[in-house]
Amino acid sequence: MQEDCLLELRGIDKLFPGVLALDNVDFTLRKGEIHALMGENGAGKSTLIKILTGVYPMDAGSVKVEGKPVHINSPQDAQNNGISTVYQEITLCPNLTVAENMFIGRDNRHWVKQKDYEKRAEEILQNLQIPARARQQLGNCSLAVQQMVAIARAVDMNCKVLILDEPTSSLDDKEVQMLFTMMRDLKSRGVGIIFVTHFLEQVYEVSDRITVLRNGELVGEYLTEELPQVQLVAKMMGKELEELNELSDSEEHTASDKEVFYEAEGLSSSEALPFNFSIKKGEVNGFTGLLGSGRSESVRAIFGADKVGGGTVKIKGKNVRINKPIDAMKNGIGYLAEDRKRDGIIADLSVRENIILALQVMNGFFKPISRSESEAFADEYIKALKIKTASRETPVGSLSGGNQQKVILARWLLTHPDYLILDEPTRGIDVGTKLEIQKLVLKLAEEDVSVTFISSEIEEMLRTCSRLIVMRDRHIVGELKGSDLNQAKVMKTIAGGEA
Amino acid sequence: MNNMFKKLIKGGMGQLAIPLIAIALLVIFNLIRDPGFFFVGISHNNDGNIVLQGNLISIINGASELAVLAMGMTLVTAACGGQDISVGAAAAIAGSVLVKTLKSGPQITGGKVLLAFILACIVAMIFGSFNGTLVAVFKIQPMIATLILYTCGRSIAYWINGGATPTVSSPIISAIGSFIPGIPVPTPVLIVILMAIIFKLIFRFTSLELFTQSVGINGSAARLNGINSTFIKLLSFIILGVCVAVAGTIGVSRLGLINHETLLLDIEMDAILAVAIGGNSLGGGKFKISGSIIGAYVIQMLTITLYAMKVSSTDVKAYKALVIILLVVIGSPVFKDRFNKFVNRMRGDKKGISEKGAAKA
């Protein structure tokens, strides 16, 4: 153990019902370093941070702060051990002053004079070069300054370890630079910073070391300067680059010369920048890119899930307008949303009701599906997709993740779509179900259904898709097909090709 | 046996378990207290009709307005996850419109009553859509949105009839408020049954139930499945508007006059309570209209029981509150959860052994 070790996590396990979220993970933070914690969705970053901050208890492992073993059972424990977190969303009170925000709830002495802490706040602000005044209302400061005040508050509470969870996602370039200056300043004062972000450029700009997690396991710890960007992407997505080059595509992807089903030109939404896209009948394509690259936003735009900006859409060559989900559904498009809990299941309703929901909406308000008919539909799909449920009347919320996903798949299959968009259909579900879903996608394609398939696991996409659209920073940066469909090429395109 | 019990607590029946048990307990309590409490007699009323009489009839009859309002309130609660506290005031408006129309000519004919009722419905639906627009379009908390009409509704009712409390005397109105000649069951009870059937038919022939529950449980997912949640929420308020007009009509007909200050005063709280006692989550989502109807009868039976026990009307509210505390605590998820755990522990030993045996095998 080095002398300057600030924080040592060893052999951390965390078990959620049915999922090993963290499996024997080690993490080391040294004094005065900025350490980026990287990984795709479900890698275990946020679980690790929540253990460190006392939100979740860990199931196995040990935590040492400055060499001393500690037990962190609550956020208060974390704070007492000098571990502070600043989250992506500002968790301060915008209607209080900067000074009040910095001192609120920190001690029980009610008689501290306002002037005293305002003076103290002013000192800290100057010391850290934060462009704000103590008496200013926090809500009037820019987001970056609010973030910095949150950090100042954390630092002033004797924080040794500062966790920044996606601090830059709502900041513009200039604000990001302000934040980085402050981070470097804190680093020079010996604070250890854990930096969680999905912006690769920022990692390379500011961090000293990188720890990569994948599927709850530690991939490795690297010095930033020794790890090229494309290698980092490879590690996050799984597969060493050497291995990648050896991998050749097992399956033959033949581009179909069938008619184009869907075509969009300059399509944009409140979330997605304009893009062009088309898909043929029976084609399986994929959108890939890191989290935040705009892949989900783009497919949501196709479905009309967000406020539509502009662009023209043609289905089978005819101009159509898709402004909201029901328009897309009436044109034969189905969309399985990325966030199953938030946008997919209606948890308290039964498996049966969840399965018939989309079809019922398409049939219309005045044409309800009869009970017996809906039971027949439910039974048919429970059997076809091997959905494990006690009965068709079981609330869908009590099913396992994989089975919930199958229920939503059943919901869309029941509408007999011409074009099905599957956004992360395999996330957080067991391997067996993953394979079933991939097989299902290929079977649908044989039946002339167009499918857009999105997955964080690149192998899955390579197995199923005949064309990959690569996105970075909300733009389409490449379209790969045929011999280009291999991991190395995909990752190079994702990372920006400068490897 | 255990399964049945579990089903009662958890399954479809589970939601109705609490109100049904409450009714059963009240019935048993009353039977012990006074075996003749539920005696239903036949007598002649002032008009010489044969009618049913007794405590049971007055409970069921007296709860009519509450039951009708509870049905609509259930729908609003399910879709919006909040309640409409303006139903009493809105009913006063609907009642005033009704009376105003009835008073507009020399005599009251059947056609005029129908017209008056339709006008009352339309006005109540307009006020309902006002509330609904605030909630569904402007995303204002239902309680805040309806606070507006709650505050000003009785003033509007006052303006409609120029501050007077006009009376209407007509055989048709008294038939609506008490008995139709030749039918021994009070008309308000028949109206409740009719409304329940109408709701049943709406659920049978439209997707209202599925869509409302979807919007209430997971609005985001409902939207991505093409459901127009704004419309569903608005619709729930408009349907409640119809219920308000019906309740207002019953209330006016019962008394034969409209008093904008007292008509269905404070009924909104009982209506919300009926929804809660009926096992419906006040946070929205899954609902059972039948539960709310039973809830309305529970409240009314409780009140009548207390009166029958010679509890003074000032004390009734306090006693009512005691019983209601009990009911809502028993109905709470926390209690259910602990109760289930308790039941599981009680039979845990036996089951644990048999499971181990199974695992070995």
Image (cartoon, coloured by chain):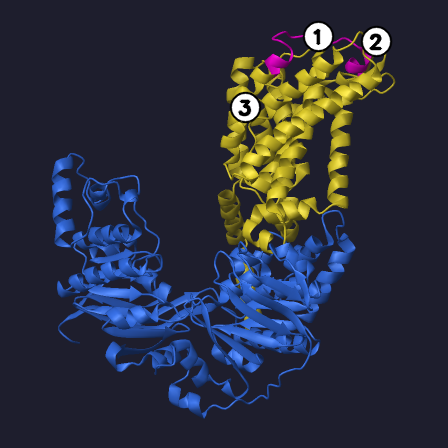
Chain colours: A blue, B yellow
Closer to the chain start, of discs 3 and 2, is 2
Q: Which mark is residue B337?
A: none
In the displayed structure, does residue A143 sit left or right of residue A99?
right
Residue at the disc numbered 3: B150
Chain for disc number 2: B
User: Type of residue at label 2?
Assistant: Asp
- Mark yes or no: residue A352 visible: no
**Which of the pair B205/B24 is nearer the observer?**
B205
Count all numbered tags in the image, as a single digit. 3
User: Type of residue at label 3?
Assistant: Tyr
Residue at the disc numbered 1: B167
Magenta stretch bounds? B157-175
B124 relative to B15, above or below: above
**Which of the pair A71/B172 is nearer the observer?**
B172
Query: Are the residues flagged by discs 3 and 2 in contact, CB closer than 8 Å?
Result: no
Q: Which mark is residue B47?
A: 2
Chain for disc number 3: B
Q: Position of residue A236 (x, y in %)?
A: 38, 76
- Mark yes or no: residue B14 visible: yes
Respond whether the residues carrying marks 3 and 1 are from the same subunit: yes
Q: Nearer the viewer, mark 3 or mark 2?
A: 3
Q: Element at badge 3?
A: helix
Closer to the chain start, of discs 3 and 1, is 3
User: Type of residue at label 1?
Assistant: Thr
Binning the other alpha carbons within 10 Å of mark 2 as few (below 14), some (14 to 19) or many (20 upward) gives few
